[in-house]
Image (cartoon, rainbow, N blue to C red):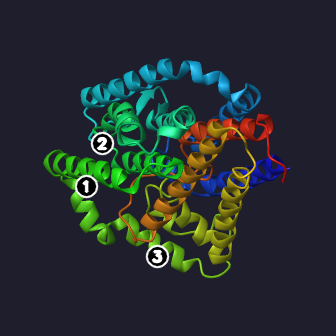
Amino acid sequence: MERKYVILLMLTIMILGIITIYSASYVYAYRSNSKVSTDSFINKHLLYLVVGILLMIIFSVVNYNFYKNLLRAFYILLFALLIFTKVYGVFMGYSAARWIKIGEFSFQITEFVKIFIIYYIADYIASNRLKISRFYIGMVRPIAYISPLLLAVFIEPDLGTTIIIFFVTVTMLFIAGAKKRHILYVSIGLLLVVIVVSATFFPYQWERFFHSHTNEQVINGETGIGSGGIIGKGIGKGAEKYVMTQSFTDFIFVTFGEEFGMIGLILILLCYWALFYYILINVRFIMDEFGRFYMIGFALYLFLQVLINISGVLAITPMKGLTVPLLSYGGSSTIATLIGFGIALNIIKNTARLPQ
């Protein structure tokens, strides 16, 4: 039964995303290049959704244990693509080397890295469940394994994704039985490394951290959400999308809040809360260790993406350039998230379950 609720909530969020993306993207398309069709972004988003849904169906049908034998191959492929992305970005002169562009399409490999690491850590926990309390087994070994991927993501630079991956990883290990002091030792060590590297090579990250409230996009975002009032201005009638450049990607909550109002924002957040609930409610009844921890990690990933994005929009925390799963425009994010859902649906369907 939970599968039906999860799918229904996903479809609801995706439909609201389509409406909001079209409302904001046609303005940006016309303003940035009058020769480009105003439907270009929504057409690409619909294509991403179709590809993502097809992959979700495949991953929901093929038994989730099948991919465990391919983890090393996936690791090498993703690491190679991350390095290629950095080299490609430097060669092209991009300040942030996060995308590989092929024609009109661009791909962000870090989105797929998130799902891969959740899958890997869940498999690692299942294989070492009784030894997780040991410092080497519970922290050193899994962190050492994912560190090359984390480093490759960090130097793109993509600090937001690095934080999410690390936080999801250590939370999964903590729930599995890793000791608090072990997590603290490793976290402090890595934090010091991040601070030194960030301050030396990416000083703008500190500028963003201390002065996020003065960011023009954030100011426009607060204005947009506030002007939406209780019931919103109506679909297509928002004003801030005319001055914001990310009104259908990182700042889609602004467009949504302005046009659907506070009621709309509450309802979409309730949809996400229900989605987390129906994913996590299965954890209590799934007998397979891997299945339980994958569901925990995936739900935590979704929760953090939404939380960090809306916190950045409201200037509570610095904006990290993270999309809202299934709502924002973003091909790689959409496809990777739907793959993640495919695995989750497969686990719900195929694992042995305790009586409810």
Label 3 CA crowd tier, 10 Å (few <14, some 14–19, many 20+) = some
Answer with mark 3 or mark 1, whichever residue precedes in sequence. 1
Q: For the C terminus, give its image quadrant.
A: bottom right
Mark carried by residue 205: 1
Q: Amino acid at mark 2?
A: Pro
Q: Is residue 81 above or below residue 202?
A: above
User: Is the Cβ of the residue at disc 2 closer than 8 Å to that at disc 3?
Assistant: no
Tell me, yes or no, if residue 235 can be seen here. no
Q: Residue furthest bottom?
A: 230
Q: Position of residue 167 (x, y in %)?
A: 43, 51
Which residue does the image show at 37% across and 45% down from the upper left?
162
Measured in 3D between alpha carbons, the distance from the residue under mark 1 to the one under mark 2, in whole angstroms, is 10 Å
Q: Is residue 120 above or below residue 353?
A: above
Q: Position of residue 79 (x, y in %)?
A: 39, 25
Which residue does the image show at 71% across and 61% down from the upper left?
274
Give left or right: position of 39 versus 93: right
Q: Is residue 143 above or below residue 300?
A: above
Answer with mark 2 or mark 3, whichever residue precedes in sequence. 2
Measured in 3D between alpha carbons, the distance from the residue under mark 2 to the one under mark 3, in whole angstroms, is 29 Å
User: Is the Cβ of the residue at disc 1 closer than 8 Å to that at disc 2?
Assistant: yes
Q: Amino acid at mark 3?
A: Thr
Residue under pointer 2:
157
Which residue does the image show at 69% across and 36% down from the upper left?
342
SS under mark 1: helix
Residue under pointer 3:
223
93 and 122: which is toward the camera: 122
Measured in 3D between alpha carbons, the distance from the residue under mark 3 to the one under mark 1, in whole angstroms, is 24 Å
